[in-house]
């Protein structure tokens, strides 16, 4: 009879408990920031906290996919997915921070592209995907290794 080890199950259950705790902390932080934004009539902290929460959840979610914490650099995943997603996630908050002068993105891009970037920010996915793939691009994730071919004789 095969002995069942509970260790993998314990780590997954611990991850779920951590997710609940992280969700509660992020909810409280968002509520606190929303009260500050209402009191000061500044929307910028609320915009930044929403992006930071996405990034934190992406980093936490990536813990499920990293098999070993040794560096296995994947430049294609980093440069083609992680960095573009993080740039898209941070573009609107950076613009909102510097909007006291003028909307930087609105002056650089046409209004239709600027509205498109606002829609991307409203999706709340790019910070999550960017941080998730950032960790996976550094630590390799659960990518299958190709077997070495013997030399032809």
Image: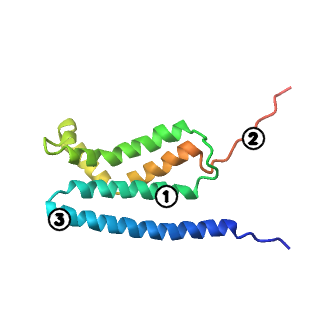
Q: Nearer the viewer, mark 2 or mark 1?
A: 1
Q: Secondary structure at mark 2?
A: loop
| Residue that mark 3 sits on | 38
Q: Which mark, residue 147?
A: 2
Q: Secondary structure at mark 3?
A: helix
Q: Which mark, residue 39?
A: none
Please report whichever mark, 3 or 2, sits nearer to the chain's N-terminal start: 3
Q: Is residue 120 above or below residue 146?
A: below
124 relative position to 103: left or right: right
33 relative position to 86: left or right: left
What residue sits 47% from the left and 54% below the top?
A: 59
Q: Position of residue 74 (x, y in %)?
A: 56, 39
90 relative position to 20: left or right: left
What residue sits 49% from the left and 46% below the top?
A: 134
- Report which quarter residue 22 is drawn in: bottom left
Q: Position of residue 32 (x, y in %)?
A: 27, 66
- The N terminus: image quadrant: bottom right
Please report whichever mark, 2 or 1, sits nearer to the chain's N-terminal start: 1
- The C terminus: image quadrant: top right
Residue 11: in sight, yes or no? Answer: yes
Q: Secondary structure at mark 1?
A: helix
What residue sits 46% from the left and 39% below the top?
A: 80
| Residue that mark 1 sits on | 60
Q: Residues within 10 Å of mark 1 (few under 14, many from 20)?
A: some
Q: Position of residue 12 (x, y in %)?
A: 60, 67
Colour scheme in the image? rainbow
């Amino acid at each position: 009879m095969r002995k069942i080890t509970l260790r993998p199950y314990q780590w997954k259950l611990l991850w779920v408990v951590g997710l609940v705790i992280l969700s509660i902390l992020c909810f409280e932080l968002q509520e606190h920031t929303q009260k500050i934004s209402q009191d000061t009539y500044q929307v910028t902290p609320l915009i930044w906290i929403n992006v930071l929460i996405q990034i934190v959840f992406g980093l936490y979610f990536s813990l499920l996919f990293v098999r070993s914490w040794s560096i296995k650099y994947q430049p294609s995943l980093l440069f083609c997915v992680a960095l573009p997603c993080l740039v898209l996630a941070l573009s609107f908050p950076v613009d909102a921070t510097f909007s006291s002068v003028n909307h930087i993105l609105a002056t650089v891009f046409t209004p239709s592209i600027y509205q498109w970037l606002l829609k991307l920010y409203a999706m709340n996915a790019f910070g999550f995907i960017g941080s998730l793939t950032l960790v996976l691009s550094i630590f390799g994730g659960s990518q299958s290794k190709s077997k070495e071919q013997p030399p032809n004789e």
